[in-house]
Image: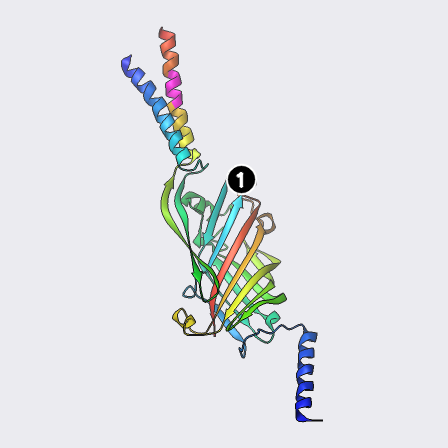
Amino acid sequence: MSVQRIGQLVLVSLVNVTVALGATQLPLPVSGKKTVTLTNSVGQNLCRFHSSAPLEEFEGTADEVSGSFTLDPQNLEATQGQIRVTVASMRTGIARRDEHLRSPDWLDAERYPTISFDIQKLTDVRITEQSRGRAVLTAKAVGLFSLHGVQKPMELPIMLTYVLENAETRKRAPGDLVMVQSEFTLSLRDFNIRGRQGVIGSRVGENIRVWVTLYGSAM
Amino acid sequence: MRGWELVRWLGLFIALVVLALWLAHGGHVFTKDKQMVVYREHDPIFGTSRERVEWKPSFRLGLDIAGPVAAVGLGVWLLGRWIRRRKA
């Protein structure tokens, strides 16, 4: 048996083991685990939310988004980390409503100053685009969502774009760059947010649509 | 009597102006003091559009203020009309 044949067999075996373990590899030449740290120098880390109720529709943002996650290019499913959003950074366009939003009746920013998502793993990872130095994948981020002191297991759909470090990326931040986008719905009832009596369902929607865009550098 | 007539028509005028202003500001239920401005630009690194959001001071009259003001204006006008008819 030639050395070339043995090499082929080893490669096939490795691929089979990887498939058996359900590990998806990043189709880019990245070695070793990477820690992705969110930074606004790459792009504005932002949560946007939309409430729809019979009396009013409104949009809001939260721009104090921080956190990090580790990404194993050989096993994307093993991604873990935490994303945090500061409740005090939430804006809706009406100063009085923002105050109400942070009050004990609503998100109670004093007792629960952050909203967080602890990423435990990724599932359903699919590489959707692969070009020179850039890969895009979709997945479900499985983890614990903490809001208003209530923790709830959730699966959030994500789209992750990974860009290898180059002259252009270095203008924003050192290392490879990562962008994560997600869109999901939160039920206020699930997180024990009751608000003032009669407001939820008339002026504030029972379900809040959320769009998240995260930017980070991987080192 | 003439002074009261002036107040009466002024009440109606204020009510109509406030309602027109409320409609011109978008007819919102609640008064807004800031407006979300979204800047979109192509991001060549990620191959998608990049958004940047800012909140800019912007007063937009809502029905929560316009409603009571218009109601008082209309009330003055109706009261003046009632007094005028009563005296006639």
In percent of width and height, residue A130 lies at 55, 70
User: Residue at the location (52% across, 74% down)?
Assistant: A34
Q: Can you see residue A103? A: no
Q: Main secondary structure of the magenta part?
A: helix
Asked if the stretch drawn in magenta spans residue A61, the answer is no
Which quadrant holds the C terminus of chain B?
Answer: top left
Residue B27, picture quadrant: top left
User: Residue at the location (59% across, 76% down)?
Assistant: A74
Residue type at mark 1? Val
In percent of width and height, residue A68 lies at 50, 67
Q: Can you see residue A125? A: yes
User: Residue at the location (36% across, 44% down)?
Assistant: B58
- Chain ID for label 1? A
* Most foreground residue, A152 or A212: A212
Q: Is residue A67 left or right of residue B16?
A: right
Residue at which label 1 appears: A199
Q: Is residue A19 left or right of residue A41?
A: right
Q: Is residue A216 left or right of residue A75?
A: left
Residue B84, picture quadrant: top left
Q: Which residues are magenta?
A: B74-79
Say if A66 sits above or below A209 in the image: below
In percent of width and height, residue B86 lies at 38, 8
Asked if the stretch drawn in magenta spans residue B78, the answer is yes
In percent of width and height, residue A181 lies at 53, 60
Residue A124, picture quadrant: bottom right
**SS type, badge 1:** loop
Which quadrant holds the N terminus of chain B?
Answer: top left
Say if A95 sits above or below B7 in the image: below
